[in-house]
Amino acid sequence: MVESFLFRAGDYASEDEAFQAYRHLYSIGADVVRGDGAFFAQVRAWRFNKLILFERRLSGVGHARTHRVQSDGFDHFTLTYLAEGQLTGMADSRAFTLAPGEAVLLDMRRKMNTQAQQARIITVSLLRNVVEAAAGSPTRLHGRILDQRAAGLIGDYLSSLVNRSDALQEGAHAAVVRVLIDLLSIGLEAPPNHGESERRLLATIGAAEAFIVEHITRSDLTPDEVARAIGLSRASLYRLFAHRGGVARYIALKRLTLIRRRLEAGDMTSINQMAKDAGFRNEAMARRGFHELDRVDPDAYRAFADPSADAAVDRARLRWAAWMSEL
């Protein structure tokens, strides 16, 4: 199943409490400020391989990335489709206003801000090489508006994903991304065969990822074996995964995801046994990697299985941070 989380302002006793919780949730990637009128937020999010999908209902709230651009090292894009309401913003120093049915691409390496009023928004966070596969060089795409004609197919597809993501299996992830690449390429009116080399690269990465997932619980799985399985040299494989910190780091991330899912489900198995089940050679490696990824000890993380609203927002924030580490 696809990993997900849900935030609802209505779960909190007051508007101010809800805003503070929402600001805490978003603090991993944006500064959140109050806008005009009453605050409201509801966020559903799903994690796919190479993208994160969000459906947000927002009002009276703004999001900004200024100094964070230099400090957090984000390297991905967001594609935001406005289904209803109002969304205004800035991409660097250029103002934009979206009408319902339009979309905007934003480069997280660069400054931006948005303000939402009575808005229903569908956003996808995309690996940079996914955008390159759709459009070639992304250097001029920050703040690019897709009008209703260009964004129509994309909006229909994203709306369908929102409605059906809960039922999708992990094996469908690659196809979900391929379809989005094609639709984004159409929306951006990319020339024929534009991004073909990037698409071939993504296909090769996908083959390596599939092999890793299939064998992830084996403690003897090595980058050399992955390279042989997909017919690449070790050096070529390392280049493919350089943007993710290397092959060994990607394998560790996948193993940590297995542990995190069990902790969130309230599994009381020892961390030592979970580490072995996930393919780590020892508990210390798992604990070290978990703390690096989630900034909390796995024993403390287990507490976030608590169903209370306060625990839920902490759990969602940690889950989202783990997803972002893969972008």
Image: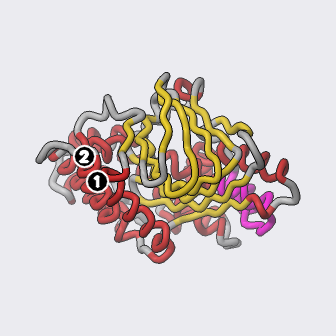
Q: Which residue lies furthest to the bottom in this view?
A: 167
Q: Residue at x 32, y 44 (%)?
A: 131
Q: Residue at x 57, y 33 (%)?
A: 113
Few, some or many residues within 10 Å of mark 2 (<14, 14–19, 20+): many
- Which is nearer the eye, 313 or 112? 112
Task: Find numbered disc 1 in the image and state the secondary structure of the residue it sits on.
Answer: helix
Say which quadrant the C terminus sits in: top left
Q: Which residue lies furthest to the left in this view?
A: 192
Q: In this view, does 317 lie to the left or right of 198?
A: right
Residue 298 among those drawn in magenta: yes
Tag shown at residue 133? 2
Number of numbered discs: 2
Quadrant of residue 313 within the rendered picture: bottom right
Few, some or many residues within 10 Å of mark 1 (<14, 14–19, 20+): many
* Relative image position of residue 51 (x, y in whole percent): 42, 53
* Relative image position of residue 192 (x, y in whole percent): 12, 47
Q: How far apart are labels 1 and 2 at the CA level?
A: 7 Å
The magenta stretch is 297-317
Image position of 119 with respect to 145: above or below: below
Q: Are marks 1 and 2 in contact (CB under 8 Å)?
A: yes
Quadrant of residue 312 within the rendered picture: bottom right
- Name the amino acid type tagged 2: Ala
Tag shown at residue 181? 1
Task: Find numbered disc 2 in the image and state the secondary structure of the residue it sits on.
Answer: helix
